[in-house]
Image (cartoon, rainbow, N blue to C red):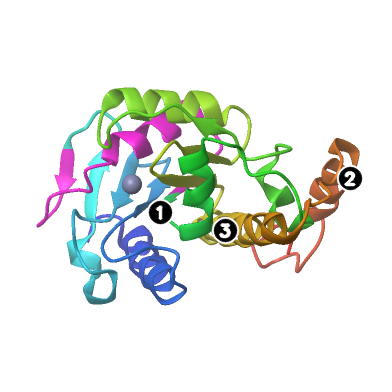
């Protein structure tokens, strides 16, 4: 099977997204990229994550050609290829519509650091990209441009994208951004939260680069 390892990872982390309620129903899509092969494994369109098998995961190249598939790819495949083409060090993209992050996307406000958990995104806050309809090349373009050097971006009135050097890393960023968004939302409901400063966030980011088990493939947390 082409890209077996990446397809198995996509199945494993698709189920985690569903179990941890980071995706609602069949919304959202995830991919893993094999740079040597120049191929990505991406979730199929509209399938229940809990029923997903490795053979359902679609393999494509970055020029929009289907390489190995029994299914239609996610309607957001161009969003994923856009990230791999522009950000050369990333190997995974997670796109979801988690509730609290999406509330900030509806407000078209960035998610600010009320907690250090999201410092792994590599920017001070999660910026919000302008609105374009799902599945369009304009959305793919604006998402990666707004993300800049960071690892997370909101899509106005839509959802969240994170990326990473591995799928576990991109998944952890989604979980930590959503946790921070919930804290920001809830603290604003009863008062005015105090945001961490640029220096404080930067210090945590630097600490995350060396924190944790050396062989876990995981940075931070
Ligand atoms: Zn979406």
Q: Is mark 1 on a helix, strand or loop?
A: loop
Q: Nearer the viewer, residue 209 or 48?
A: 48
Q: Earlier in the sequence, mark 3 or mark 1?
A: 1
Q: Which of 195 and 31 is in front in this view?
A: 195
Q: How far apart are marks 1 and 2 (CA)?
A: 28 Å
Q: Which of 42 and 98 is in front in this view?
A: 98
Which residue lies under the disc numbered 1?
Answer: 97
Which quadrant: the N terminus? bottom left
Q: Which mark is residue 200?
A: 2
Whether 184 is drawn above or below 133: the answer is below
Q: Position of residue 184 (x, y in %)?
A: 68, 54
Give the quarter of the image for residue 112. Answer: top right
Q: Which of marks 3 and 2 is nearer the N terminus?
A: 3
Q: How far apart are marks 3 and 1 (CA)?
A: 10 Å
Q: Give the range drawn in magenta.
A: 66-93
Are the residues tagged 3 and 1 within 8 Å (C-beta)?
no
Q: Position of residue 19 (x, y in %)?
A: 41, 77
**Per the image, is 88 magenta?**
yes
Q: Where is residue 62 in the image (x, y as percent from the top left)?
A: 30, 32
Which residue lies under the disc numbered 3?
Answer: 178
Are the residues tagged 3 and 2 within 8 Å (C-beta)?
no
């Amino acid at each position: 099977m082409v890209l077996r390892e990446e397809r198995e990872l996509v199945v494993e982390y698709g189920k985690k997204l569903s179990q941890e309620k980071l995706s609602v129903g069949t919304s959202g899509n995830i991919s893993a990229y094999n740079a040597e092969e120049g191929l990505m494994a991406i979730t199929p369109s509209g399938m229940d994550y809990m029923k997903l098998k490795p053979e359902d995961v679609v393999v494509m190249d970055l020029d929009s050609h289907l390489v190995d598939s029994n299914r239609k790819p996610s309607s957001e495949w161009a969003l994923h290829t856009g990230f791999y083409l522009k950000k050369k060090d990333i190997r995974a993209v997670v796109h979801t519509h988690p509730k609290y992050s999406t509330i900030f996307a509806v407000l078209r406000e960035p998610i600010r650091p009320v907690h250090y958990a999201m410092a792994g995104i590599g920017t001070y806050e999660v910026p919000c990209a302008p609105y374009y309809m799902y599945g369009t090349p304009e959305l793919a373009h604006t998402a990666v441009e707004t993300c800049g050097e960071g690892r997370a971006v909101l899509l106005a009135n839509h959802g969240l994208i994170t990326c990473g050097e591995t799928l576990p890393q991109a998944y952890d960023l989604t979980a930590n951004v959503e946790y921070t968004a919930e804290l920001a939302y809830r603290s604003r409901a009863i008062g005015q939260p105090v945001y961490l400063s640029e220096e404080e966030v930067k210090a945590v980011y630097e600490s995350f680069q060396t924190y944790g088990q050396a062989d876990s493939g995981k940075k931070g947390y």
